[in-house]
């Protein structure tokens, strides 16, 4: 029965146009779908690999999924077939999720049958698409089916979460990272690694509207919190990158709380690179104080405390110069305590 259902997937999936099934004798005149049909398994894979999924290539990817559905029983553990299957299904799901035009022209029953195929032959590469589907405006039964497949699979959650963090829109990244952190079966190392990966993804993400801008901001804040709590020193360079972004703001007041938290996190991580960067920042503030320019004393206090916590001699010169620059007694006292920690470490 299942085989029969797969054979009708693309009859139900059909768009307004109907392609001819006749294959021309001259291969150069064939459409991509016709070339796919006429080719051997290795050539089919090359054809799919050369064409990106899009509205214009959707018919090719439908043809490839039809081929995968009809031949699944005959190519068990065949690497070429398995790669065709993953590329084909991933391509169809990708276009469905990204194109409202294609979604409207595709029947609910055909999408549901496609999800059944994924349920029978799950693969980690397909799961970011399923996660996206559950958060989109599909009919309830489609969203529920995608969600059920996602959460009932035996594929390790770390793998699926990692793929979503890398590939999905920022709202999905934020949501899945929250689930990772709340999952008692995830180790501290896995949480640290995925938080680092989420920070990298946030830095490279191209936002499309104010909601995504806010989501990227929240994702970075969440990652810094996790890295702070885990004392995940492997993420020191990422937190430093975030620190540089925050201090570049013209209005520090807008990011003061995040900046203080980030500085404190750098102190907790305790790496040499953090000490060098924070010491350079002290040097910059020292130059402001020397010229009588304004600086944020609360931020300065946090930097001094973090440098004292790290105890790296890289901070010695800039901390020792503070006594001569007319800082408040509180700042001088904090710098002296920080220096004493450096002397201990020396």
Image (tube, helix red, strand yellow):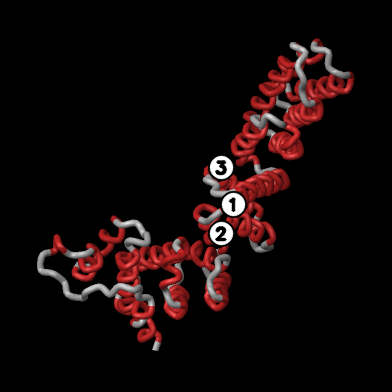
Mark 3 to mark 2 CA distance (whole Å): 18 Å
Residue topped by disc 1: 194
Q: Which mark is residue 161?
A: 2
Residue 195 place in picture, x, y as percent = 62, 49
Q: On the rendered image, what quadrant is the C terminus found in?
A: top right
Residue at the image position 36 percent from the left and 84 percent from the top: 3
Which of the two residues, 252 or 176, is positioned nearer the viewer here?
Answer: 252
Q: Residues within 10 Å of mark 2 (few under 14, many from 20)?
A: many
Label 2 SS: helix
Task: Answer whether residue 23 is visible to the viewer in this image.
Answer: yes
Which of the two residues, 34 or 130, is positioned nearer the viewer here?
Answer: 34
**Mark 2 or mark 1, earlier in chain:** 2
Residue topped by disc 3: 203
Q: Image check: 266 left or right of 31?
A: right
Residue at the image position 55 percent from the left and 66 percent from the top: 136
Which of the two residues, 121 or 294, is positioned nearer the viewer here?
Answer: 294
Position of 46 relative to 331 (above/below)? below
Number of numbered discs present? 3
């Amino acid at each position: 029965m299942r085989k029969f259902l797969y054979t009708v997937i693309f009859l139900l999936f059909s768009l307004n146009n109907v392609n001819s099934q006749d294959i021309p004798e001259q291969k150069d005149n064939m459409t991509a779908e016709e070339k796919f049909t006429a080719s051997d398994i290795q050539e089919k894979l090359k054809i799919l690999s050369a064409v990106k999924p899009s509205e214009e290539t959707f018919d090719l990817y439908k043809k490839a999924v039809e081929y995968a559905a009809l031949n699944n029983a005959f190519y068990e553990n065949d690497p070429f077939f398995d790669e065709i299957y993953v590329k084909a299904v991933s391509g169809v799901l990708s276009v469905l999720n990204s194109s409202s035009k294609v979604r409207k022209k595709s029947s609910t029953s055909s999408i549901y049958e496609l999800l059944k195929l994924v349920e029978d032959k799950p693969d980690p590469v397909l799961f970011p698409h399923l996660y996206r589907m559950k958060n989109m405006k599909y009919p309830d039964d489609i969203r529920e089916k995608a969600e059920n497949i996602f959460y009932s699979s035996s594929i390790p959650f770390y793998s699926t979460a990692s793929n979503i963090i890398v590939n999905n829109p920022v709202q999905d990244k934020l949501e899945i990272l929250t689930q990772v952190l709340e999952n008692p079966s995830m180790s501290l190392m896995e949480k640290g690694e995925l938080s680092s990966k989420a920070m990298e993804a946030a830095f490279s993400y191209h936002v499309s509207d104010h909601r995504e801008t806010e989501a990227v901001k929240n994702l970075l804040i969440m990652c810094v919190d996790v890295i702070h709590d885990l004392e995940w020193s492997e993420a020191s360079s990422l937190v430093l990158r975030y620190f540089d972004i925050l201090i570049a703001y013209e209005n520090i007041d807008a990011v003061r709380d995040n900046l203080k938290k980030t500085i404190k996190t750098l102190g907790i991580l305790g790496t040499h690179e953090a000490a060098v960067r924070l010491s350079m920042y002290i040097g910059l503030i020292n130059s402001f104080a020397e010229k009588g320019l304004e600086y944020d004393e609360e931020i300065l206090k946090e930097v001094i405390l973090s440098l004292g916590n790290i105890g790296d001699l890289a901070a010695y010169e800039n901390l020792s110069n503070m006594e001569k620059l007319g800082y408040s007694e509180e700042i001088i006292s904090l710098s002296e305590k920080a220096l004493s920690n450096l002397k201990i470490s020396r």
